[in-house]
Image (cartoon, rainbow, N blue to C red):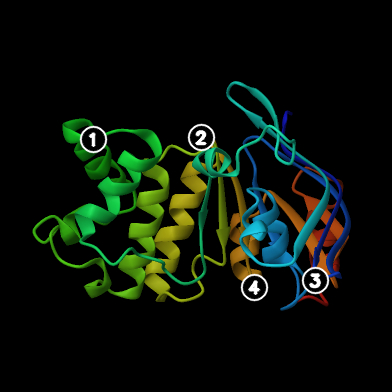
Amino acid sequence: MTAAVSIKNLRVTFNGAAVLEDITCKTRCGELTVIVGRSGSGKSTLLRAVNRLNECFPGCSTTGVVRLSLHDGQLAVYADGTCPERLRGRVGMVFQSPNVLPLSIERNMLLPQRLVRGITGRAAEEIMRRMLRRVGLFDEVCDRMDAQAATLSGGQQQRLCLARALALEPEVLLLDEPTASVDYQSARRIEDLLLSLKDELSLLVVSHSLPQTRRLADRVLLIREGRLTGQWHRGQANADAAFEKMLSTTF
């Protein structure tokens, strides 16, 4: 099976202090990979390293190799010729807390399409409707598209962020605890959506929930104190027992 994301000897420091050390791993196309570990272990830093978002923080230094398998071939994330802004157009991210734009629901969907993909008019509106339906939000907002996105509930805002990310047609989607700040019903809707997406794009998800990891993961990466200390995948021998043993001291 093709490697979707390949990481070798990744090291990330902030102001000289190492947050990640010597991370080497691969994720596979068609699989949903979950990154687990205790708070402060470096999970979010690992996720952000895939689309160079750590560079948005002062004092960050990254070494090592990150390669992505995209539709048009391999992309070296940290190569000199790789533009971070273009990279982030192909590697989307959804954060733990919904980060809706201070605009209407409609503008939240249409503006990124125009800025990132140059899509406007009826084409952008069709994509907007399709993605809002994909996340189960269209019927809830179709009669108030001009309302401020901030007036939506937390669960609705997070689904709007997912729809906005999907509207840009990323080939890799990074999700940092996407259900942490939403209600149970919204969480299950998001989980079902992620399971339906894994055959279409590469998914990396940070989770603090053992039940969620059980439901979603085809592959698990365990991070402890900035190092990769365990890996698991469904196809390995004695998979269930190995899963429980690896995560028994994590959650």
The crowd level at tag 4 (other Cα within 10 Å; few <14, some 14-19, many 20+) is: some
Quadrant into which the N terminus falls = top right
Marked residue nearer the N-terminal end (2 or 4): 2
How far apart, in angstroms, are the residues tagged by discs 2 and 1?
Answer: 24 Å
Q: Nearer the viewer, mark 3 or mark 4?
A: 3
Left or right of residue 15, residue 100 in this image: left
How far apart, in angstroms, are the residues tagged by discs 2 and 4?
Answer: 25 Å
Q: Which mark is residue 15?
A: 3
Disc 4 secondary structure class: loop
Residue where numbered disc 4 is placed: 208
Marked residue nearer the N-terminal end (3 or 4): 3
Residue where numbered disc 1 is placed: 120
How far apart, in angstroms, are the residues tagged by discs 3 and 4?
Answer: 27 Å
Amino acid type, residue under disc 3 in the picture: Asn
Left or right of residue 30, residue 144 in this image: left
Marked residue nearer the N-terminal end (2 or 3): 3
Amino acid type, residue under disc 2 in the picture: Glu
Q: Nearer the viewer, residue 134 or 103?
A: 103
Residue 168 found in image quarter:
top left
Residue where numbered disc 2 is placed: 200
Q: Nearer the viewer, mark 1 or mark 4?
A: 1
Disc 1 secondary structure class: loop
How far apart, in angstroms, are the residues tagged by discs 2 and 3?
Answer: 38 Å
Amino acid type, residue under disc 1 in the picture: Thr
